[in-house]
Image (cartoon, helix red, strand yellow):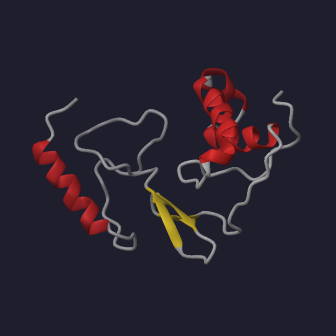
Amino acid sequence: LFGVGPCQPPFESGQVVVDKTLCWAELQLALWYNAHADFVYEVLWGDKDTFNIAWRRLGRTYAMTQNWCGWDTHTILQYGPGGRVLFQHRCRDKFRLGQEIFAGTPQTFEGNHFNPRLAHEELCFRLRDELRQVWKGA
């Protein structure tokens, strides 16, 4: 369908490091796939596959860390080359100011759940609370 062989391991597309001067065409193709999510996401697993396919479709090699993602309660943990956690993606407990609903990703808890094992958790909760005090809405 996309002119490439079987899928390789998916990208975690929330955090990628890309030299845009070298990979602009690949980024534009991934953007095009994602802009057509109404079709593309019916046959793929979302943007983590569109990046992979865009790079392979245009014949560009790429490197990924050897560490697979981990999980802690509600958060994907993404590791760097040395095995340290570089990114935390609170995919199942997104910070929210009220009772927002995330249709695509069910949330584990009704309100935000404090997890002391996550880096900067106290700071994030404090900043969320400060924003809640001043936010007037969009």
Question: Horizontally, is 16 left or right of 98 in the view?
Answer: right
Q: Position of residue 15 (x, y in %)?
A: 54, 53
Question: Horizontally, is 27 left or right of 113 in the view?
Answer: right
Q: Which of the pair 96/60 is nearer the observer?
A: 60
Q: Residue furthest right?
A: 5
Q: Position of residue 43 (x, y in %)?
A: 73, 30
Q: Is residue 12 placed above or below 87 in the rendered structure?
A: above
Q: Is residue 116 placed above or below 62 in the rendered structure?
A: below
How many tags in the picture? Answer: 0
x 68%, y 47%: residue: 22
- Name the quadrant of the C terminus: top left
x 38%, y 71%: residue: 119
Q: Residue furthest front?
A: 21
x 10%, y 47%: residue: 133
Q: Position of residue 76 (x, y in %)?
A: 52, 59
Q: Position of residue 66 (x, y in %)?
A: 71, 68
Question: Horizontally, is 10 left or right of 69 in the view?
Answer: right
x 45%, y 42%: residue: 106
Q: Residue furthest left?
A: 133
Q: Which of the pair 119/71 is nearer the observer?
A: 119
- Name the quadrant of the N terminus: top right
Q: Which of the pair 41/17 is nearer the observer?
A: 17
Q: Is residue 6 placed above or below 85 in the rendered structure?
A: above
Q: Which of the pair 122/13 is nearer the observer?
A: 13
